[in-house]
Amino acid sequence: MTLEGVVQELETDLQRVGQKVREVVKSSNPLLARVTEYFLSGSGKGLRPILVLLSGGFSKYRDDRVISLAAALELVHMASLLHDDVIDNSDTRRGQMSVNAKWNNQIAVLLGDFFYAKALNLVGSVGKEGVEAVAQIINTLTEGEFEQLSCQFNTLITEDDYFQRIEKKTARFIATCCKLGALYSEAPEEVVDLLSQYGFNLGMAYQIRDDILDFTANKKTLGKPVGSDLQQGIITLPVIHGINYSSKGSEIINIIKSKKPDFAAIYKIIRETGSISYAQKKAEQFSQRARECLLPLPECKAKNALRLIVDLTEARTS
């Protein structure tokens, strides 16, 4: 099975998710409608809706609440991207101009707020547990962003600090997608717990891999400027390893602390000191834990697809 095969298997439900998103964000305000359509036109199928739907594949029961959940969680993700682009001053998103670059920061922030509000409104039809989970995700994402901002250019940040940050910014969100997909498909409790753990470990692996790509990808495949994390003061795992475990740690610190940092020099050091390989091994450890969470689950198409997503996360180049 390929990713295209997974998407094809879910095509009908993914179309319903997309339709639900467009339905709830529809607006009579011309500017809001235009900006919304522009942003949505650059969106893909979405990892989070796919995980919600696949996690619901371990039960024969499925109702419209799962579709609404998938749409609400995708709206939360979209809102976080809009706000991230403002915070990071990014001018591209998924290969096109970001909303803040095409219009301005105010419009990007307001559109993100609009999506958050619509997500909470939509999940209100699902039930109390769904509302609480989505509200908690928004809270956790915000905390993670504050932790990232408070540690800008901080060369004393530890691996534990880093893992705590990506847990809040990515892993808990992915875990919630898997948990709610299973829960609202009335899967057994042990299946819900295993899928939640799977999502957490997948999310950790995904974010570490994303941070590696900031050093190894190119702008065309990544869809955003390469090296942008460090230029914004975001200290990721490859840099932490380079500072603490390579012979050129002091050199990296001095460059970061200088008035005009030579980021190209840091990228070169990181690539030459084994820090990329170290981070990749950490990502592979989380990937393996995700696979292990799937082992007790019954064999089915959903399980095969979730296993494939782990493999693709390890191999991703964008």
Image: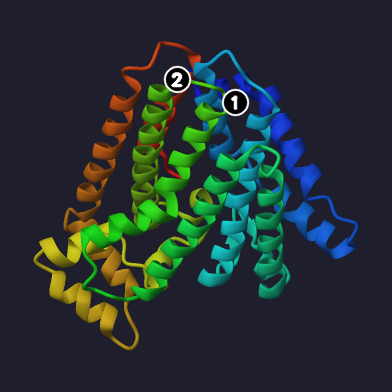
Q: Which residue is mark 1?
A: 7
Q: In the image, what residue type sits under mark 2? A: Pro
Q: Is label 1 in a helix, a strand or a loop?
A: helix
Would you say 305 lies left or right of 273 here?
right
Compare marks 2 and 1 and give the one earlier in the sequence. 1
Check the image and report above or below for 133 versus 230.
Answer: above
Q: Residue at x 21, y 73 (%)?
A: 156
Residue 201 figure quarter: top left
Judge depth for marks 2 and 1 and give the one in front. 2
Q: Residue at x 35, y 59 (%)?
A: 165
Q: Nearer the viewer, residue 57 or 311?
A: 57
Which percent across, then down, holds residue 147?
38, 68
Q: Nearer the viewer, residue 165 or 206?
A: 165
Residue 311 figure quarter: top left
Q: Is residue 315 visible?
A: no
Residue 53 figure quarter: top right
Would you say 226 lies left or right of 86 here?
left
Q: Residue at x 37, y 32 (%)?
A: 198
Which residue occupies the extreme front position in the image?
Answer: 128
Which residue occupies the extreme bottom position in the image?
Answer: 259
Which percent across, then down, holds residue 195?
41, 29
Q: Which mark is residue 188?
A: 2
Q: Nearer the viewer, residue 149 or 179?
A: 179
Q: Is residue 79 visible?
A: yes
Would you say 269 lies left or right of 103 here?
left
Check the image and report above or below for 179 versus 118.
Answer: above
Which percent across, then down, holds residue 97?
66, 62
Q: Is label 2 in a helix, a strand or a loop?
A: loop
- Marks 2 and 1 sit apart, C-alpha to C-alpha, by 25 Å
